[in-house]
Amino acid sequence: MADLFGTPAPSDGEAQQASKNRPLADRLRPQSLADVIGQEQVLGPEAPLGVMLASGSLSSLIFWGPPGVGKTTIARLLAQETDLHFVQISAIFTGVPELRKVFEAAKIRRQNGQGTLLFVDEIHRFNKAQQDGFLPHMEDGTILLVGATTENPSFELNAAVLSRSQVLVLERLSLADLERLTQRAEKELGRALPLSGDARDALHEMADGDGRALLNLIEQVAAWKVEAPLGREALSARLMRRAAKFDKSGDEHYNLISALHKSIRGSDADAALYWLARMLEGGEDPRFLARRLTMMSTEDIGMADPQANTVCLNAWQTYERLGSPEGELALANAAVYLALAPKSNAVYVGIKAARRLAKQTGSAPPPKHILNAPTKLMSEQGYGDGYAYDHDAEDGFSGQNYFPDGVKRPVLYQPVERGFERELKRRTDYFANLRLKRNK
């Protein structure tokens, strides 16, 4: 049947051809939640969404996860399964005027007995005022909000929005999930991909847990005219690996530096090299890594191996002189040295305890016997009276008090029996015993 402008309706053949011309990701979009691959921790019968749907009570949601894991698809299917009108907007392209129109339309639908599921992609890009604008419409039932974000909601979303929503974490697709998606794509295409088993695994690795990226790669592979299945090397030569997820100012930045730090603290040199490489490959500034490695040397190795700090500073200086990529090897050397060095946080713990004590004792002055008396008045006030010059004392140690009067002597530095700190523990024990003798 022709439309109002006299355009003839497409034939069945033309409709089929138009369907084939649609992107593979669009053609394979799930038609029900049961068709969704992965995310069992969210969609399973005992998982949050499974329980909500079974009870017929759906709350506002925030989907937090990397790209290509099904956030938009799941939101659309939730609207379908709960008979809600689905509205999708992006925080990147939507301003306050557009939001007002969305809310007004939702109010009209509600008056007519139709609810609205408002899906907001990249919701973290809305500022505080824009996020606050959702609250009254969430509270009176005008909209059921489903937000999607790749950033940590704890840092990027208002507390008021979070308190009215349930945060659900969507995970990267596993290799098994990607294989299921590949099989579904091959069924849609009507033929197997021209890849060996090893190349097929490589294809899944290239997708890096992103289902949409995998389908785009599959479309490219399916279009190739090859006489025999391609191996891993041939595939890698024809396709570029998807760039690993890494945002130098976002949540992934802090996740990876945390992984590097904890690997070093856990004395795992292999893991330290891996996470260092992940950050370098992701485009992290090597100077940032040099600074963090130097910080680790003081926080986690400390006096168990004082040389660790020097190693890090030398690596930093080496990088500054050589630049990338040659200077990055110096950072790798430092990471391995730190991972295999003896560990102690005794000084770190000690200075934190000292600062707490400093806050508690306010402005208590040093004891007068350790104050200088450069003037007659100060001398008359007792400054320097009774000071024992340690070089003149037996064993070069007087054992006198250096803390403010009235402050009970604390034990702030407690060296461990590891590395060079084993020797420092012997020394601190020696002086502690000598102090007791001197003050009897």
Image: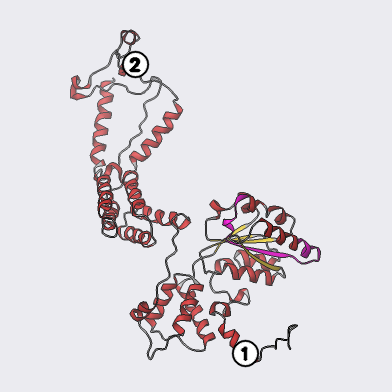
Q: Tell me, for residue 14, which label it has, or none.
A: 1
Residue 110 position in % (x across, y down): 78, 63
Tell me which label, 1 or 2, sits earlier in the chain: 1
Q: Is residue 115 magenta?
A: yes
Tag 1 near tag 2, CB within 8 Å: no
Seen in the image, is 102 located left or right of residue 210?
Answer: right
- Residue at the extreme front: 5
The quarter of the picture where residue 365 lies is: top left
Q: Tell me, for residue 368, which label it has, or none.
A: 2
Q: From the viewer's side, name the closer residue of 434 and 286.
A: 286
Q: How is the image coloured?
A: secondary structure
The quarter of the picture where residue 51 lies is: bottom right
Seen in the image, is 286 located left or right of residue 118?
Answer: left
Q: From the viewer's side, name the closer residue of 89 and 201.
A: 89
Identify the residue at image location x=62%, y=58%.
166
Identify the residue at image location x=52%, y=89%.
190
- Asked if 59 appears above or below 13 in the picture, the reply is above
Residue numbers of the magenta segment: 107-128
The amino acid type, in three-letter code, at marker 2 is Lys
The amino acid type, in three-letter code, at marker 1 is Glu
State the separation of the CA atoms marked 1 and 2.
98 Å
- Asked if 284 appears above or below 213 in the picture, the reply is above
Q: From the viewer's side, name the closer residue of 170 and 288.
A: 288
Seen in the image, is 205 located left or right of residue 384?
Answer: right
Residue 171 position in % (x across, y down): 51, 65
